[in-house]
Image (cartoon, rainbow, N blue to C red):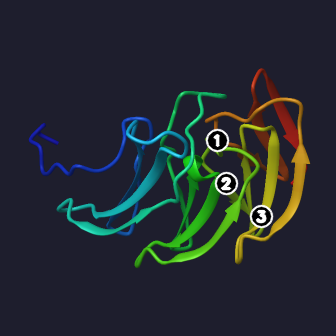
Amino acid sequence: MNGVIAWTAPYGNADASPTIADGRLFVEDAQTTQARPGRNAWNDVYALDAERGRLLWSYESGRGFLTRIGTSEEAIAGMLHRAVLFQSLPAARRFAAFDARTGRVLWSTRTDAAVKMSAIVFDRRVYVGDTAGVLYTLSEGDGRVLRRRRFGSFFTCSSPVIVGKTLYVAANESVLALSP
């Protein structure tokens, strides 16, 4: 590391950390337009060649709204597991799984509100919470909602962790310890 810039690319958002594996770098961006009222925001997901910064694939979510609930973050870091990118699409109120190599959407699940946290996968299940206070347990394979647990407060950009068989997740001013 000598501080020389190897490449730059016009993708991503300072809100979200990149995700990297197998020579690919994944970033999300949030776009807004004030030109039209109503659904004026969307999220873009990009996969780049980590060595050269060349765009490999991109995806634009459906239009929706960005919210400041929980955090003003608009782009969320994805999570890579078994060549699948699990990515929140906050403006569209969706959570999706992408084939990391091709960008093909494997599944997409509607959420009650914006998901502003990176996911965690455990025992073939994906865990993620939204800004309406719903913690989702999704099937890793098809995105089917296996369980919805409503809590009294929103989930923010703090990613959940699993230690042993306990899921720890922050919900506003509380930390929850749950059995997945």
Q: Amino acid at mark 1?
A: Ser
Q: Residue at x 12, y 50 (%)?
A: 6
* Nearer the observer, 27 or 165: 27
Q: Residue at x 62, y 43 (%)?
A: 117
Say the numbered circle drawn on residue 138. Answer: 3
* Gap in angstroms between the C-alphas marked 1 and 2: 8 Å
Counting from the top left corner in percent of width and height, residue 48 is at: 29, 63
Q: Is residue 73 left or right of residue 114?
A: left
- Counting from the top left corner in percent of width and height, residue 120 is at 67, 54
Q: Quadrant of residue 66?
A: top right
Q: Tag 3: residue type?
A: Leu
> Disc 3 on helix, strand or loop?
strand
- Residue 133 - label: none
> In the rendered image of this protein, does residue 160 appear above or below residue 67?
below
Instruction: Identify the residue position indicated by label 1 in the image.
Output: 159
Secondary-structure class at tag 2: strand
Q: Are marks 1 and 2 in contact (CB under 8 Å)?
A: yes
First along the sequence among labels 2 and 3:
2
Residue at image x 21%, y 59%?
Answer: 53
Q: Residue at x 71, y 45 (%)?
A: 113
The image quarter containing residue 153 is: top right
Q: Nearer the viewer, residue 31 or 19?
A: 31
| Residue 124 higher or lower than 136, as above or below | below
Image quadrant in which you'd find residue 54: bottom left
> Looking at the image, is mark 3 or mark 1 earlier in the sequence?
3
**Number of residues whose C-alpha sits closer than 10 Å to that of mark 3, classed few (under 14), some (14–19) or many (20 or more):** many
Residue wearing tag 2: 120
